[in-house]
Amino acid sequence: MASTNSYFRSIVTSHVEAHPKLAYAILATLAISVAHYAVTSALYGKVAHSKSLQKTPPVVPHFLPFIGNVPWQFAWSPIEFFKSSYYAFLQHPVRIRLFTKELYIIQGRENVVAHLAQTSTSNTMFNASFLRQTCAMSSYAVERLGSETEETPKYFERKYLAAAPLYAWSSSVIHRYLAGRSALRLSQRFENNLRGRIEGHQALAVPEGVVLNNFLDFFIDDVTAALLDAMCGNGLLERNPAFTGAFWTFCENFPTFMKQIPRFLAPQAYNAREEVLAAVANWQTWASENFDANTTPLDEDGDDPFWGSKFFRERFSTFVFDMGFDARDMASMELGFLFGASSNVTVNTYWCAIDVFKDQVLLKDIRKEVQACKTEDKGDLRFDISKLIQQPLLQAVFAESLRLRCHNMFIRKTTEAINILEWVIPKDRFVIAWSTPGHMDSKVWSDTNDIHPVDTFWPGRFLKYTDKSKFAQFSLTKREGSWLPFGSGANLCPGRHFAKIHCILTLAMMVERFDCEILAEPKDLKIDLSKFGMGVLGPSGKVAARLRRREKKTE
Ligand code: HEM
C-alpha cells in the first residue's frame, strides 16, 4: 500500500512539475467545488430543518457552481434513481439548479397532492410543446390557443384553471364528452366493436390458433381499431385502412417528437406523422362535406355516422367555421386527442393481458370473476359492465399494472406565488412532481417481509380483507398521492373511468374467448424506458404469443 501511495505521489508531483498551470487550475477547481458543496449543504440543512411555516424549498447541494445538480443516474436508469437517490426520496420539496435553470421538485405525498390541486398553476407550456412538437400544429395556431385575448363561444364561462381561454374551453368540452351519458355511449360503442373484432378473429377459426410474432399487434390492429371506430365512427379507418399501423408508429415516437430528434435520424416517425395527419384531415373534410344539419339522421344523443360523435362535429364547427382555424391545425389538435385517448390505455391493457395469461392461478381467478358478470346467453360475450368493473381482482390487476408501469412527470408553471402546505413557491417558476417515487415506495406498497418487492407485479397490494366480508375488496385507501397514473386534483385525467372500462372489458372478452400462451421468458418482458415520465411504458421488444379458441375445461 505504501508503495502504491508513493507511486501516485510521484506521478502527481511529476505532472505538477511538467504542467504547473493546468495542475493549479485543477486544484483550484477542486477547492472551489468542495467549498461550494460545503456552503450549499449548510444552506440546505438550515432550510430543511427550519420550523418556519413559510419557507422556500432548499437548493440541493452541488459541487459545481455554474453547472448545478446533474442527475446522471436519472439519464440511464430513472426508476433506480427514484428508488435509491437520497434526494429523490425526501419527503419535502427541493430546488435543483441545472445550468441557468432552476426547478422546484415537489416531493412527499401530501405535498404532491396539494401541488396537483393548485388551480393557479398552468400546464399551457406542456400543451403548447405537445401540439407544436408532437402534433405538428402551426406556430400561429399554437399561439392563438395560448393567447389571453381569444374569445370562447358565448355560452362558455371560463373554467377556474389558470389556462388561456381556448385551452380552458377545449378542456371543458373534452370533460363533457368523457362524462355521463356521452361516456356511456362511447363505452357501448367500444364494447360492440371489440366484440365484433374478437368474434371474427382468425385465431378462432383454426383449432391450433395463430402465433402472433408481436402480441402488441392484437392491441393495435383490433383493440385500438375498436376504440378509434367508437370515437370517430367508421369513416376514419374505412377511408384510411392503413391508419392504425401508422398511428401506432406515431404514438410510439412521442419521445422522438418531444425531444425534437431530427428527421434524418427518425424518418419513419415523421413519415408516419404525416400519414396520420393527412388521414385525420381527410376524414374530417369528408365528414364536414357529407354531414347536413337538415338531413343527416342523428341518434338520440345527437351523434351522427360521419363524425362518429357530436364531440368531433361541434369542435370542428367551432374551431374551423366560427374561429377560422385551419383544417390542418384542427387535424393536429384531434390527432393529439386520439393519442391521449389511445396510447396509455392500449399499452396498459396489453401488459394486463400478459400478466393474466402467463399466471395460470391468476387466470383462473380472473375467469371466475368474469363468469360471474355474464349476462343473457352464457356463450355470448356480453357482461354486466357495472358489476364487471367492480370486481376486486380485475380492478387490482388494472391498478397494479399502472402502478408498476405508468411513470408521469407533472410539470406546471406558477402564475402567482403559491403555497404548498408550508412551502412557498414564487410566481413564474417551473414546478415538477413525479408519480414514480409514490409508485415505488416500499413503505406504502410492500409488506414488512418484502415478499413482493415494489418492482414486481402483484395485484394483492390492492386487495384488503375486512371483517364485513370473507372476500377480498379492492382498496386504494391510505394510498392518496402514492398512486397517480391519472394525476390528481385540478388536471385529473378525464378519461380515467373509460380507461378502466377499456382495460377490464378487453381482458374479460379475451379470457372468455381465448387461451393465450405468452411465448417469452419473464426476463424478456422488459419495459422501454425511453418514454419515462410520459405515461405507461411500452415493451422494449416484441413478445410473441399463441392465441387460440379457449378450451373449456370442467373446473
Ligand atoms: C391508462 C390510461 C390513461 C392514463 C395513464 C392517463 C393519464 C393522464 C394524465 C397523467 C393526464 C394529465 C394529468 C395532469 O396533467 O395532471 C391525462 C390527461 C388527459 N387524458 Fe388521460 N390517461 C389515460 C387514459 C385516457 C383516455 C382513455 C382518454 C380519453 C378517452 C384520456 C384523455 C385525456 C385528456 C383529454 C387529458 C387532458 C385533459 C385536459 O387537458 O383537460 N386519457 N391523462
Image (spheres, grey):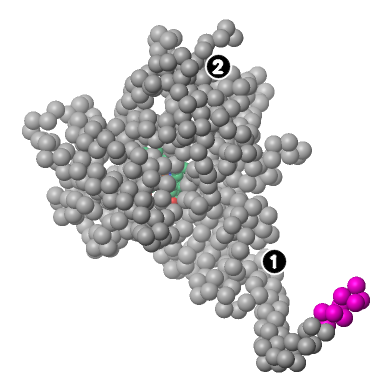
Q: Is residue 376 above or below residue 280?
A: above
Mark nearest the camera among 2 and 1 is 2
**Mark 2 or mark 1, earlier in chain:** 1
Task: In this rendered view, identify the residue nearer to me: 547 or 361.
Answer: 547
Residue 197 spot, x, y in % from top left:
35, 24
Taking the spot 34% from the left edge, 43% from the top edge, the residue there is 247
Residue 386 highlighted magenta (yes or no): no
Residue 534 in view:
yes
* Residue that protrudes farthest toward the right in the picture: 2
- Contact? badges 2 and 1 (CB < 8 Å): no
Magenta highlight range: 1-9
Residue 373 in view:
no
| Magenta segment main secondary structure | helix
Tell me the quarter of the image containing the C terminus.
top right
Query: Which residue corresponds to mark 2?
Result: 368
Amino acid under disc 1: His
Taking the spot 33% from the left edge, 43% from the top edge, the residue there is 246
Tell me the quarter of the image containing the N terminus.
bottom right
Residue 449 spot, x, y in % from top left:
77, 38
Left/right placement of residue 446 relative to residue 520 reads: right
Residue 49: numbered disc: 1
Residue 109 spot, x, y in % from top left:
59, 50
Quarter of the rendered image showing ligand 1? top left
Q: Is residue 554 above or below residue 417?
A: above
Label 2 sits on a secondary structure element that is helix
Label 1 sits on a secondary structure element that is loop
Residue 144 spot, x, y in % from top left:
25, 61
Label 2 Cα crowd, 10 Å radius (few <14 / some 14-19 / many 20+) = few
Whether ligand 1 has any atom under 8 Å from the Cβ at mark 1 is answered as no
The answer to which quarter of the image holds residue 151 is bottom left
Left/right placement of residue 4 relative to residue 532 reads: right
The Cα–Cα distance between marks 2 and 1, rounded to whole angstroms, is 53 Å
